[in-house]
């Protein structure tokens, strides 16, 4: 049923298959999703057969239940696949959260379907009823005459239970199969063909259950006040905002002189926080990147949005403010038509690409990026054949940057502007890297500090080589950590452990040290400004290259269910229960301070805005 439905859909949408997406690749990914559903349906049955008493297995109750269970699942599968063609024609995707949400209004939905999709509805009912009838008849005619004793069943069925459990996992890797594996092109419709509609609908239900509990703010202030405070924090005149449907949409006026379309390369560093930079108050570990202070646009006081890679990617690529929910990379409504840096550059004629040393299905990166402006995703499946060293997380940083260097050479010859996001893996447990490449910071070899020094060596060497290339003058390089490696410290939110390095170099970037407090979400508008691009964006971050910014700066930090909003040395911490705590930074410590109602409302506005923006679709390109 899954395969027949998929082939019919592929025939119907054959025009969507291009050089970047083939039917064979879709089918090669699809069988794993089908297997997950089939094994999940069968696993519960086999578990009962494995451990239940013989008396139950031989009873009519169990045989009736077994027949009903399997027939019901077959009917659900047939119904979902029968509903898919019309749903896909309407929304361009397989049944997703809209399919599930419509169940809240059954009368209105039924009347709409009856008027607009009557034939499809009747055919779906007929197919589903026929499938259920035939399944019931087939299963009901095969009564179980005998059942082995429990001990024998325990031995004989154990391999089958293990095989089905493995099938539900869907992967031999260290991560189970996830929906991101279906993505093979920048066309969401083609990516959805690799799924089946039962998997996509169940996944939507699971996502909605997660969002229901965590996608909310820390208080309740009027929507108008939320918008007003967020706009005020952007330090733009009221006339800059002209679209009520997207309250933060504005034209970014660059500080760099417009001229051409420079390339942009973002080198996102796994866990390479300020802890490894002596000039930022840390250890003398990252020696090569330290040399870029004084010859780049250097951030002295930049803070990460969270403690996970997905949160760092969310901040750098989308400029979206952090929430209690998982990052937007994983949220269902953000899988298409969600603003990203790739989208705004693609609209300017750029080629866009994400290159990751590991598995791009991790944290749903592949699916999110391909659905939101990236033309191509490259990961270890393409990098491993030519890699000299790899770990459980992916290829070494040197292998990663060697591949990127060759790509940039080809791009320079092509002449079309490009945006390349590169995400490293070496500075991650088990902290393994090639021998003889660096002078170890400490013994033994496989420690955080040594892995961080190797990561610094790899990216630093790549930058030195790039600086000597002819295309350096037309390319901006941003280096930034996704988060700190050690989020430890005192207080409800260990604010000082969110400090990360970042700098922008290359092209016509003038050296400058930014000492005011800044957030990871500020990097997106700052990069566009230094590129000299005049574009319209909804991102609420601050262009840190502006000379008219006032105040000490601000940073937003998400720590599990707790949020910290820092302005200068004042920090407002918001608890999930709605309690607010005010602190002041004194050296390396946070000291309790008297309540600050104004700062609390600022913090509430900046935590409530992303929830509203996500729910109401404000964050569109």
Image (cartoon, rainbow, N blue to C red):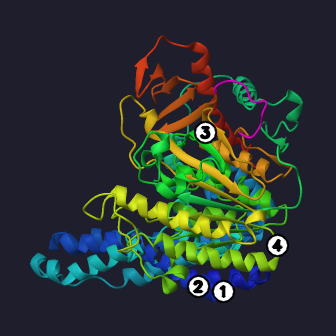
Cα gap from disc 2 to disc 3, whole angstroms: 43 Å
Front residue of 562 and 43: 562
Please tell me which of labels 4 and 1 falls first in the chain.
1
User: Range of the magenta residues?
Assistant: 544-552
Helix or strand or loop: what does disc 3 sit on? Answer: strand
Q: Residue furthest bottom?
A: 24
Q: Are the residues flagged by discs 4 and 1 in contact, CB closer than 8 Å?
A: no
Determine crowd level at label 4: few under 14, some 14-19, many 20+ residues with C-alpha closer than 10 A. Answer: few
**In the rendered view, would you say 515 is above or below 177?**
above
Q: For residue 333, which numbered disc appears in the image?
A: none
First-in-chain label (2 vs 3)? 2
Q: Which of disc 4 and disc 2 is earlier in sequence?
A: 2
Q: Position of residue 109 (x, y in %)?
A: 71, 53
> Looking at the rendering, which quadrant does residue 520 occupy?
top right
Marking on residue 27: 2
Direction from residue 386 to residue 408 in the image, left or right:
right
Q: Quadrant of residue 157?
A: bottom left
Residue 519's tag is: 3
Residue found 54% across the figure and 55% down from its top: 289
Q: Could you tell me which secondary element the residue under label 1 belongs to?
A: helix
Q: Residues within 10 Å of mark 1 (few under 14, many from 20)?
A: some
Residue 355: % across, % down: 60, 70
How far, Cα to Cα, is label 2 from label 4?
33 Å
For the N terminus, give its image quadrant.
bottom right
For label 4, the residue is: 416
Residue at 28 percent across and 68 percent down: it is 61
**Which secondary structure, mark 4?**
loop
Q: Please name the residue shown 66% across and 52% down the image.
A: 504
Q: In this rendering, which labeled residue sits more in front, label 3 or label 1?
A: 3
Q: Report the residue marked by disc 1.
A: 23
Judged by its main secondary structure, the magenta piece is loop
């Amino acid at each position: 049923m899954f395969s027949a439905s998929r082939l019919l859909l592929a025939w119907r949408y054959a025009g969507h298959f291009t050089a970047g997406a083939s039917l064979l690749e879709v089918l090669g990914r699809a069988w794993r999703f089908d297997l997950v559903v089939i094994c999940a349906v069968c696993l519960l049955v086999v578990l009962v057969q494995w451990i239940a008493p013989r008396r139950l297995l031989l009873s009519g109750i169990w045989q009736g239940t077994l027949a009903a269970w399997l027939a019901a699942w077959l009917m659900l599968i047939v119904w979902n696949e029968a509903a898919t063609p019309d749903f896909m024609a309407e929304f361009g995707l397989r049944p997703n959260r809209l399919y599930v949400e419509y169940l809240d209004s059954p009368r209105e939905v039924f009347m709409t379907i009856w008027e607009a999709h009557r034939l499809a509805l009747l055919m779906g009912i007929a197919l589903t009823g026929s499938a259920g009838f035939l399944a019931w008849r087939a299963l009901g005619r095969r009564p179980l005459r005998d059942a082995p004793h429990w001990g024998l069943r325990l031995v004989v069925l154990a391999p089958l239970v293990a095989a089905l459990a493995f099938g539900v996992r869907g992967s031999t890797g260290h991560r189970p199969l996830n929906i991101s594996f279906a993505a093979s092109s920048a066309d969401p419709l083609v990516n959805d063909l690799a799924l089946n509609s039962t998997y996509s609908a169940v996944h939507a239900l699971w996502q909605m259950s997660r969002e229901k509990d965590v996608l909310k703010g820390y208080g309740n202030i009027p929507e108008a006040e939320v918008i007003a405070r967020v706009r005020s924090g952007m330090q733009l005149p009221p006339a800059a905002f002209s679209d009520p449907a997207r309250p933060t949409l504005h034209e970014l006026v660059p500080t760099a002189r417009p001229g051409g379309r420079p390339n942009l390369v973002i080198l996102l560093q796994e866990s390479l926080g300020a802890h490894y930079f002596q000039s930022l108050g840390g250890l003398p570990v990252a020696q090569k990147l330290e040399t870029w202070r004084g010859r780049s646009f250097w951030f002295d006081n930049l803070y990460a949005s969270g403690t996970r890679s997905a949160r760092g990617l969310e901040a750098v690529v989308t400029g979206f403010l952090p929430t209690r929910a998982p990052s937007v990379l994983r949220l269902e409504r953000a899988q298409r038509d969600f603003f990203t840096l790739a989208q705004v550059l693609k609209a300017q004629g750029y080629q866009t690409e994400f290159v990751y040393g590991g598995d791009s299905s991790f944290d749903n990166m592949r699916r999110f990026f391909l659905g939101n402006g990236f033309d191509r995703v490259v990961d270890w499946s393409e990098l491993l054949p030519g890699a000299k060293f790899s770990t459980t997380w992916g290829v070494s940083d040197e292998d990663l940057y060697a591949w990127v260097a060759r790509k940039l050479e080809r791009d320079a010859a092509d002449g079309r502007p490009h945006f390349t996001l590169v995400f490293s893996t070496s500075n991650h447990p088990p902290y393994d890297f090639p021998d003889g490449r660096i002078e170890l910071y400490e013994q033994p070899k496989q420690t955080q500090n040594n892995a961080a020094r190797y990561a610094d060596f790899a990216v630093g060497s790549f930058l030195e080589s790039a600086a000597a290339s002819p295309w350096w003058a037309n390319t901006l390089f941003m280096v930034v950590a996704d988060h700190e490696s050690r989020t430890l410290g005192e207080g409800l939110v260990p604010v000082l452990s969110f400090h990360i390095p970042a700098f922008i170099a290359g092209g016509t970037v003038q050296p400058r040290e930014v000492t005011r407090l800044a957030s990871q979400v500020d990097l997106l508008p700052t990069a566009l400004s230094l590129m000299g691009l005049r574009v319209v964006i909804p991102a609420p971050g601050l262009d840190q290259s502006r000379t008219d910014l006032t105040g000490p700066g601000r940073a937003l930090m998400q720590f599990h269910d707790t949020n910290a909003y820092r302005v200068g040395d004042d920090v407002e911490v918001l608890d999930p229960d709605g309690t607010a705590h005010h602190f002041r930074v004194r050296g390396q410590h946070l000291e309790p301070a008297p309540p600050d109602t104004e700062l609390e409302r600022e913090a509430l506005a900046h935590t409530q805005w992303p929830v509203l923006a996500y729910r109401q679709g404000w964050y569109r390109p």
